[in-house]
Image (tube, rainbow, N blue to C red):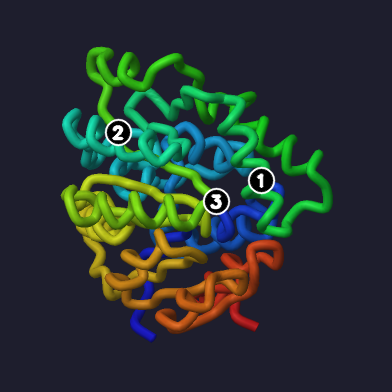
Amino acid sequence: MNRIDMIATDMDGTLLNDCRNVSKANVEAILEAQKAGKTVIVATGRDYTEAVSPLKEAGLRLPLICANGADIRREDGKVLHQQTLSDDQFKTMAAMLREEDIYFEIYTSKGAFTDNEKKGLELVIDLLETTGEFSSKEEATKLAEKRFEVGAINRTESYESVLEEENTELFKILAFSTDDVRRNRVKDAMELNLNVAISASAKDNLEITHKDATKGKGIEVMASYYGIDVLHTMVIGDNFNDVSMMEVAGFPVAMGNAEDEIKKICKLVTATNVQDGVAKAIQTVIPHMQK
């Protein structure tokens, strides 16, 4: 293994447990890595507000790659780099998604927005239930509703009105559909006709960003900023929006709960997100933490 100078971890399904919290073991491992001189960052599909919330709760201040690389921040929140979607791209994609009756949200420089809270809640609850992480619909509902309670997603009557506001940039479109045919049809059309990057953080969603807004590009930006060779970077993830950073990093790690295709491209498979998998992965590069 090359010397590891930077560690990047995904959030949902990776750093966060099924209650969407950072475990004590993961916090302690991150702090130990920092003491050992390692730069620890988070790479997530979440927007900045939604990403920083669980970190604050855990007492952590970390640099962030948000919206799959569209919005990159230092630990103090200062913007390092941003890649945005154009008005024309939004209009085209919105028309495609609406034609297929696919629900979507927008992630902007003013936060994330939904124009149909009821449908958004229903879809997120259904998706959470299909993961098998929750013993009841009530538990899944409580977590889905928390997105609105903590301000992680805002309500609007019109996405167009949000994007028309001064100094508002569009980072990402997040679309949900349990209809594989519709979802794949719109994905194929976008890949064929639009210059965008499309990934997924779950089986039933699409995450659409600028072609140069990927977690892999984000890792390269962070490595350059901190003066670190990407070959000396460990990245930890569980899903397909993590692939781009796994392809550029020197030491990619898959969570125990990762998709099989993800595990195949990684050099190490750690424990699951409910078994402190991030902490166990970090321990492999911190000599005094090794057992």
- Please state the horizontal and vertical placement of residue 259, each as a whole percent of the image: 53, 72
- Please state the horizontal and vertical placement of residue 36, each as a whole percent of the image: 46, 65
Disc number lying in front (1 or 2): 2
Write the residue at 28% across / 38% down: 93
Q: Are marks 1 and 3 in contact (CB under 8 Å)?
A: yes
Q: Is residue 78 visible?
A: yes
Q: Amino acid at mark 1?
A: Asp
**Label of residue 178 in the image:** 3
Quadrant of res 137: top right
The mark nearer the N terminus, 1 or 3, is 1
- Please state the horizontal and vertical placement of residue 135, each as a whole percent of the image: 83, 53
The reply, left or right, for residue 263 in relation to residue 211 is: right
Count numbered badges in the picture. 3
Label 1 Cα neighbours within 10 Å, binned few <14 / some 14-19 / many ≥20 = some
How far apart are the alpha carbons under marks 1 and 2? 25 Å
The mark nearer the N terminus, 1 or 2, is 2
Label 3 Cα neighbours within 10 Å, binned few <14 / some 14-19 / many ≥20 = some
The reply, left or right, for residue 72 in relation to residue 278 is: left
Write the residue at 55% across / 51% down: 178
Q: Secondary structure at mark 1?
A: helix
Q: Above or below — where is 16 with respect to 253?
A: above
Q: Amino acid at mark 3?
A: Thr
Write the residue at 35% across / 70% down: 233
Q: Which residue is mark 1?
A: 126
Locate the N terminus by quadrant.
Answer: bottom left
Q: Secondary structure at mark 3?
A: loop
Quadrant of res 88: top left
The reply, left or right, for residue 132 in relation to residue 97 is: right
Q: Which residue is mark 2?
A: 95
Q: Above or below — where is 39 with respect to 280?
A: above
